[in-house]
Amino acid sequence: MLDKLLTFFKGSGAGRVAPGAAGQADANAPLDPAHAELIAGDERRNGRAWSAAARHYRAYLKDQPEDFAIWVQLGHALKEDHRLTDADDAYGEARRLRPANADLLLNHGHLKKLRGNLADAAALYMASAEIQPGSDVMLELQNPLIQHQLSESQRRWLQARRPRP
């Protein structure tokens, strides 16, 4: 499939990623192989072919190791493929790049909870809530198993943010 993508993009002029004058794409530039891996990874993800998506994302990240969003996508794909230790590593790399991303912290918390590590899940959920106290993370923090992991001051912080009836 990757060969077909490369052939398609080379022949059509679409998807070129080499910049030309004034930051415009250069239609005559060769397709960046990393970008082809990214496209293939996205297609596999959209088709719920998690293992294949992860393989393509890893290939892309070899060339673009600072791409935060794809580390997150790799973590998602690995989690869906039940490769939880690898997913944890991918989310950890994404956290190295952007330690204060609320959505990443929430998703990493979900993975920790899935793995049975409620203390880490609670810490990640709290970190996410402190950045962006959205409904998803606040709901997770109401879980009695997660509440049990929180300190008294964290429970008070949450209580102060609960909507009043």
Image (tube, rainbow, N blue to C red):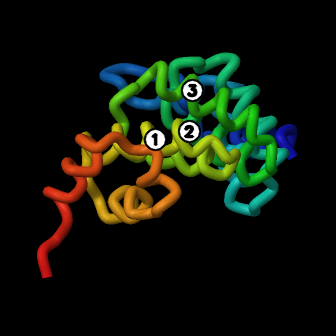
Q: How far is mark 2 from mark 1, CA to CA?
A: 7 Å
| Disc 2 residue type (three-letter) | Val
Between marks 3 and 2 in the image, the one whose residue lies nearer the viewer: 3
* Quadrant of image for the C terminus: bottom left
Q: Quadrant of residue 12?
A: top right
Question: Badge 3 is on which residue?
Answer: 92
Instruction: Tell me where residue 87 appears, x and y as whole percent.
Output: 69, 37
Instruction: Tell me where residue 28 appears, x and y as whole percent.
Output: 59, 27
The earlier-in-sequence mark between 3 and 2 is 2
Question: Badge 1 is on which residue?
Answer: 104
Outermost residue on the bottom side: it is 165
Callout 2 crowding tier (Cα within 10 Å): few <14, some 14–19, many ≥20: many
| Disc 3 residue type (three-letter) | Gly
Residue in the picture at 50% in, 37% down: 69
Mark 1 lies on a secondary structure that is helix
Q: Quadrant of residue 7?
A: top right
